[in-house]
Structures are given as C-alpha cells and as structure tokens.
Image (cartoon, rainbow, N blue to C red):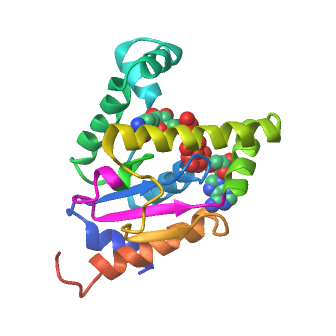
Amino acid sequence: MTKIETLKKSIEGRRICIAVSGKSGCGNTTTSSLIARTLGLNLINYTFRSLAEERGVSLKEIMRQAAASDEVDRIVDRRQVELAQEGNCVLASRLAIWLTRASADLTVYLHAPDEVRVQRIHQREGGDINEILEFTRERDRQDHERYLKLYNIDNDSYDFADLILDAGSNNPNQLLDLVVDELLRRFGPGEESP
Ligand SMILES: Nc1ncnc2c1ncn2[C@@H]1O[C@H](COP(=O)(O)OP(=O)(O)OP(=O)(O)O)[C@@H](O)[C@H]1O
Ligand SMILES: Nc1ccn([C@@H]2O[C@H](COP(=O)(O)O)[C@@H](O)[C@H]2O)c(=O)n1
C-alpha cells in the first residue's frame, strides 16, 4: 500500500478538517486543491465571488459593499467556518488557521518570501511586476490592519500552526508530501485516536 492509500484508509470516517492559510500568492489554492483531491476531501474555498453568486450580484458589487462595511468580511469568514464544521475538508483561506485553531485536525501555514509571492502573482495574472509589488505590499498592509481591527488577529503571528511550511522552495507535491507525513504521524496505523 502507498503512503497515501494508508492515510486515506486511516482517516476514513473521521471527517477530518485541515486548515491552510498564507498570504496572497503563497500557493494556498494550488496546494489546498492538491491535498483535497489526493485525500478525497472537499475543498472549501468560499470567497467574495461565492457570496456574489449566492446573492445574485456582481463581484464588483460585493467588493463595493466590503469597502463600505465590515459585514461582508465577517459573513465570508463565518460562512467558511460553518462549511468546515461538516468536516471531511480542506479549508483554504486567509484566516482559516486562526478561525479554526481550536477545532481543525491540522493547521498549516504556507510561508513564501514576498518576492516569490509577487513573482507568482505576476506569473498567474501578468502585468507590470513593479505595480504588482506595490499592490501586494499595500494589500498585505491593509489585510493586516483589517484583521487586527475586525478580529484582533495578527496574521503575522502563526507560530501556533501545527506545520509551518516553506512554500517558497517546495513545490506543491513536496508540500503535499509533508502534510501527508504529518497526518500519518497523527492518524496513521498504530496511532491512538485523538
Ligand atoms: N509551491 C509552489 N511552487 C511554485 N509555484 C507555485 C507553488 N504554488 C503555487 N504556485 C503557482 O503560483 C501561482 C499562485 O498560486 P495560487 O493561485 O495557488 O496562490 P494563492 O495563495 O491561492 O493566491 P491568492 O491568495 O492571491 O488567490 C500559480 O500560478 C501557481 O501555479
Ligand atoms: N476576511 C476575508 C476576506 C477575504 N477572504 C478571501 O480571500 C480572497 C482573497 O483573494 P485574492 O485573490 O484577492 O488574494 C478573497 O476571495 C476572499 O474571499 C477571506 O478569506 N477572508
């Protein structure tokens, strides 16, 4: 049996939840999708776009509402946690590890240096690299300020995470492997049920 088959068998019926956070461009969507697909878990990636679809309005309209009121951020973050409570999932979001730190079976922080994140966003979206650098810096600053104000969460303090992974030099498959090893340590054959 492969490592992944062993793990899948061990977590069968446990309804586990893995929370993954990191700053924009760290590779959260890519890595979380890969973990979810490989382990047969649902990916929860509830975004402003999802809320816009639910409300039958444009993404632009949701972003306008979000700029005018904290309520939109709160709704998106609350909904993500509600969906994660069903378990059997990978919750990928900016605040996943903070919002589920008491309930998730594994919390993972993906760290990538700023210049790597900027290069990746550039590779994903194109455009002028210097503008992306400025935009990303400003967004990081605004996110930090907003999460402190909204929830008293300092998103630069992630040392409580079960795994802090170097998403700058590891590719998504290597990151998956590190997550699988940690899950095997926790839930693999011979481990006591937590
Ligand atoms: N570990 C990695 N190594 C190299 N490239 C990666 C890695 N992870 C993701 N990428 C690439 O970097 C880009 C950004 O990845 P992704 O969209 O997953 O980031 P993200 O953290 O979800 O960003 P955002 O929060 O801005 O949506 C994509 O083009 C993806 O293919
Ligand atoms: N409080 C929040 C606010 C936003 N999000 C989600 O993060 C996504 C950010 O994606 P970018 O492509 O803009 O980096 C966005 O889609 C929001 O839904 C969040 O999780 N918590």
Question: Where is residue 165 shown, x and y percent of the image?
Answer: 52, 69
Work out which residue is located at the far left of the displayed protein and give it: 193
The reply to whether the magenta stretch includes residue 30 is no
Q: Quadrant of the N terminus?
A: bottom left
- 32 vs 78, nearest the viewer: 78
User: In the picture shown, does residue 55 fall above or below 16?
Assistant: above
Q: Is residue 97 left or right of residue 34?
A: left
Question: Which of the 4 image quarters holds residue 69?
Answer: top left
Up the image or down, 41 lies above or below 76; here it is below
| Residue under the point 38% across and 67% down | 161
Q: Residue at x 51, y 73 (%)?
A: 177
Q: Is residue 110 left or right of residue 120?
A: left
The part of the chain drawn in magenta is 98-113
Is residue 105 magenta-colored?
Answer: yes
Q: Is residue 66 above or below residue 14?
A: above
Return the residue nearer the eye: 36 or 18.
18
**Camera-side residue: 112 or 47?**
112
Q: Quadrant of residue 187?
A: bottom left
- Measuring from the top left, give residue 95's x and y in whole percent: 39, 48
